[in-house]
Image (cartoon, helix red, strand yellow):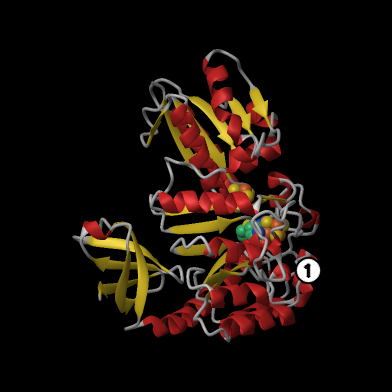
Amino acid sequence: MKKVYLETYGCQMNVSDSERVATALGRDGFEITNDAENADVVLINTCSVREKAEQKLYTQVGRIRHSDGPKPVVGVLGCVAQLEGETLLKKIPGVDFVVGTRAVGRVGDILTRTIDGESGLVDLGEREDDYDWTVADTHRHSPYVAFLPIIEGCNKFCTYCIVPFSRGRERSFSAAEIVRQTLELKRRGVKEIHLIGQNVNSYKPDTEAGLEGFAGKSAFSRLLRAVAATGIERIKFTTSFPRDFHEDIVEAIETHQNLCNWVHLPVQSGSNRVLKLMKRGHTIDRYLKQIDRIRGSVRDIAITTDIIVGFPGETEADFKDTVELVKYCGFDSAYIFKYSPRPGTPAHELDDNVSPAEKTLRFLELENVQKACQNKRLERYHQASLEVLAEGTSARTENGITGHSTCHKVVNFVGDRSLLGSIVNVKVTQVKANSMFGEVV
Ligand code: SAH
Ligand code: SF4
Ligand code: F3S
């Protein structure tokens, strides 16, 4: 039995693709291993969103090439594979085959042919059918939490972003199929599903099947209600695109308790001028109205975001606008990134004129402001009782259990292993920057 080690970088879409690859390879008679050193095959599912992410591929292949012992077969999957295609074979000695983002359903076939002696196979083709999207039965990142893709690709072409090039055009999965899979996951004991996509609220299926009778202006809010009606315990969704974010999404959350109280709504910048240069298609004014609506909800909905600092032409004044926005919004958490020019994107043609030192300064300043706001916001959880899905044991404390709240915060507590997979009421006794600690009520 050949042993396959699968390394995954990037977003949930990549994690989800890797889960399907691992499951399919398991079915084809390969053994999935956590031991990279002794693997016969190493598959690297790559990310290209920033230069640092892309660099991981080169580091990893370099490590394999320079290690002693027999050399494994190396396959590159994912976004870098899609973007670079055949050139990867020449650029990185030691790479045996390349499989793009929508061809992952054929990895098993390509791997078998490679083992049988074919070399330099490259597949950048489309998915064969919707079957390629079904949630893996085995080899998922958690027995209790499942990632369920509802839309893939991106049509937005934000000027800094490589994703529309690496993931292709938007394509939505039928609601009937999403509901069917949710019911199947529920039957198998999954407690929480994450509806995933580059922009989930741009969801636009070819067919109404599965959405009939559900209220809401957008197809996405109707899908939320349809999935909520399955009765699965918890539903989260990410990422939401501000331009397509409407009140009907908040209304759905207000109606269905199993739609979790968390929205990830990346703003990217607090300056209208920069947003325009980024071609985000939304203004600060509109964004703040959305934040106000979410904050004004009868449910306490956590809001998280992504922000880029140092976009070409971002002035000190633009940056200050971002700082002000962060202070106003009081995000429950924010991912802050330094702008990284990506070859092939429109912004790559602009002068990357914020110096690395300045980017670092802005990054650190914004991080500090966010931390302070976050700490203040998180105080509301102190002594509060949260519903936590017990997902795993934590190595650090004896009888430590770790999981997520409905608002998607990490919560650690002491409890018996038998609690794993159940939803536990936990009273929060300690709030830290990125996690909380509590006691079972
Ligand atoms: N579709 C999602 C984000 C996908 S990429 C959205 O529109 O919000 C995840 C995050 O990476 C983005 O939100 C952005 O903040 C960051 N990102 C994307 N391209 C980047 C680049 N070239 N440099 C730095 N950060 C980038
Ligand atoms: Fe990238 Fe913009 Fe698409 Fe998000 S919406 S994936 S940032 S192009
Ligand atoms: Fe990275 Fe591709 Fe996801 S570039 S963030 S793995 S869509």
Judge left or right: residue 223 versus residue 206: left
- What residue is rendered at 55% in x and 40% in y? 45
Q: Is residue 26 visible?
A: yes
Q: Is residue 16 above or below residue 71?
A: below
Q: Nearer the viewer, residue 165 or 65?
A: 165
Seen in the picture, residue 194 relative to 368 is either above or below; the reply is above
Q: Which residue is mark 1?
A: 281
Q: Quadrant of the N terminus?
A: top left
Q: Nearer the viewer, residue 304 or 54?
A: 304
- Residue shown at the point (46%, 50%) measured from the top left: 185
Residue 112 x/y as whole percent: 53, 20
Q: Amino acid at mark 1?
A: Gly
Toward which corner of the image does residue 358 lie, by quadrant?
bottom right
The answer to whether residue 11 is visible is no
Give percent across and percent down for residue 110: 58, 24
Q: Is residue 114 above or below residue 35?
A: above
Task: Say which quarter of the image contains residue 238.
Answer: bottom right
Q: Is residue 44 above or below residue 267?
A: above
Q: Report the image quarter containing ligand 2.
A: bottom right
Quadrant (top left/top right/bottom left/bottom right) for the C terminus: bottom left
- Rendering coords of residue 174 (x, y %): 66, 50
The furthest residue to the front: 213
